[in-house]
Image (tube, rainbow, N blue to C red):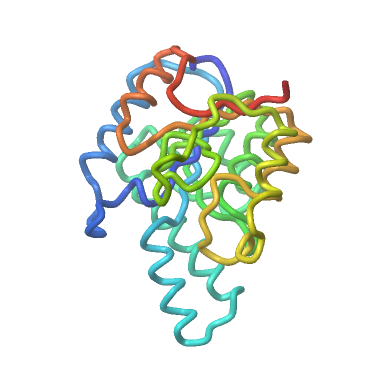
Amino acid sequence: MKDKNVVIKIGGSLLFTEEYKINLKKIAEFCKIFKSRAYSGNHVIVCGGGLVAREYINAVRSFNGSEALCDAFGIEISRINSKLLIASFQDFAYPLVPKSIEELSTAILFNKIIIMGGLQPGQSTTSVALEVAEFIGAQNLIILTDVNGIYDKDPKKFDDAKIFKHLNYDELQELILKISYSKQAAAGEYRIFDAVSLQILKRSNIKVFIMSGKELSEFEKFWSGDKAINGTIISKE
């Protein structure tokens, strides 16, 4: 993975245990793997809000807060998660969380690992990661999530869910269209991919590798150069 611009999207829930405790061991392991190889090029990590963001969002909804307010909470939590990773990377990371593409363009000049969260209401952090990848000319986007890849249905609810090893853009679009859009744009609503992400992907021709971040062995293998991942690969063809 060296000598290339790469974007990694890490689900916010992966930074916490099921008891909502900060998973210091997982964060330290992720940083160690990331720093295990010398590299050049721009490397950006985009953090999601995860479990904690959804807790805040549910609380705001219980007070009849607007979806715009819920979005604002989700963005802030994703940026706090980003600051946590910045602290773990120490001097390897750019010390500030870019809040716009303009701020990202400045951060790139410092040749550090850049870590950021959400950018604007109504935009998932997957869409942010794709927009960032497009902006810096990254050929690959790595998505670390709490499942092994993209399935034909929710693997947490259905034991017979089948994973897709490879999807092209048209196949991904067909899959997204099958999903109910009633909550597609709701704050905190988790989708590995949504309609906005798909449109950015189709115009940018980025290759996406989706794998589990619950156990980082797959990411470690990929980061060392082995592309035969146990997950889902999305590409134009």
Query: Measuring 58% from the left and 42% from the top, which residue is drawn there?
Result: 129
In the orientation shown, which residue stands out farthest toward the front? Answer: 160
> 65 above or below 169?
below
Counting labels gives 0
Image quadrant in which the C terminus is located? top right
Query: Measuring 36% from the left and 44% from the top, which residue is drawn there?
Result: 85
Residue 187 horizontal side relative to residue 175, left or right: left
Residue 181 in the image, given as x and y percentages of width and height: 66, 60
Residue 82 visible at all = no
Residue 63 in the image, given as x and y percentages of width and height: 46, 87
Query: Measuring 71% from the left and 49% from the top, which residue is drawn there?
Result: 177
Question: Quick one: 160 or 60, which is closer to the camera?
Answer: 160
- The answer to which quarter of the image holds residue 234 is top right
> 74 above or below 155?
below
Question: Quick one: 175 or 11, which is closer to the camera?
Answer: 175
Question: Quick one: 77 or 206, which is closer to the camera?
Answer: 206
Residue 231 visible at all = yes
> 8 above or below 49?
above
Residue 39 horizontal side relative to residue 186, left or right: left
Residue 128 in the image, given as x and y percentages of width and height: 61, 47
> 41 above or below 162?
above
Residue 203 horizontal side relative to residue 108, left or right: right
- The answer to which quarter of the image holds residue 25 is top left
Query: Measuring 64% from the left and 23% from the top, which residue is drawn there?
Result: 139
